[in-house]
Amino acid sequence: MDPTASIIVPAYNSKNSITRCVKSLKQQNFDGSYEIIVVDDGSKDDTAALAEKAGAKVFSQKNSGPAKARNFGARKAEGGILVFTDADCTPEKNWLEEMLAPFKDKEVIGVQGAYKTRQTSLTARFAQAEIEERYGLMKKNASNLDWIGSYSAAYRKKDFF
């Protein structure tokens, strides 16, 4: 049975976060089937081995950056909906369910998820404030997004390509 969704995580030298990320993805409150794909982007650490040990399908490529890693993972994906997050993210248990809910509307092509940070540095807090302001603006015109952040994004596979 093909999975409903494929979660794709580009990762580069992410040994300090990839296990937490994959474990949070495996613990999603979601009734459908989904796969977790980590694309190791030429890491020089144990990222690939740790991701595999945590339960992800792992594919590797020469270091080419996160965009190419996402696209590589999308080509390997079996799910009809591609869901993206980053290796340093720890999605909450209802993240996948909420990301996929808008796709019940056949007109929806892509969705953007919310972002919260546990970082306490002043720079991180300012970046978070800017992101929250952007979310507020997007809510006013939710049917016409002009920007989707890759740390929490989903697209119909047929439309992604």
Image (cartoon, helix red, strand yellow):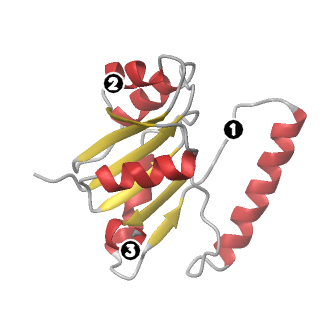
Q: Percent from the top left, x then y, of residue 96?
A: 40, 49
Tell me whether circle 3 and circle 1 mark residues in contact (CB < 8 Å).
no
Q: Nearer the viewer, residue 23 or 65?
A: 65
Compared with residue 47, is residue 70 higher up or lower down, i.e. above or below?
below
Q: Position of residue 137 (x, y in %)?
A: 73, 71
Mark 3 = which residue?
A: 159
Q: Secondary structure at mark 2?
A: helix
Residue 130 pos. (x, y %): 81, 55
Q: Of label 3 and label 1, which has the lower sequence position?
A: 1
Left/right of residue 158 with respect to residue 87 in the rendered view: left
Q: Earlier in the sequence, mark 1 or mark 2?
A: 2
Q: Is residue 98 visible?
A: no
Under mark 2, the amino acid is Glu
| Residue 50 shown left or right of residue 120 in the figure | left
Displayed quadrant of residue 94: top left
Disc 3, SS:
helix
Residue under pointer 2: 52
Q: Nearer the viewer, mark 1 or mark 2?
A: 2
Task: Give me the C-alpha separation between circle 1 and circle 2.
Answer: 26 Å
- Which numbered circle lies on residue 117? 1
Can see residue 51? yes
Q: CA distance from mark 3 to mark 2?
A: 29 Å
Judging depth in this view, the residue of 102 and 88 nearest the camera is 88
Q: Quick one: quadrant of the C terminus?
A: bottom left
Gap between marks 3 and 1 measured at Cα: 30 Å
> Residue 14 appears at what percent x and percent y?
56, 26
Out of 160 and 123, give the one closest to the viewer. Answer: 160
Please rate how many residues cluster around mark 3, counting C-alpha atoms within 10 Å: few if below 14, some from 14 to 19, many from 20: few
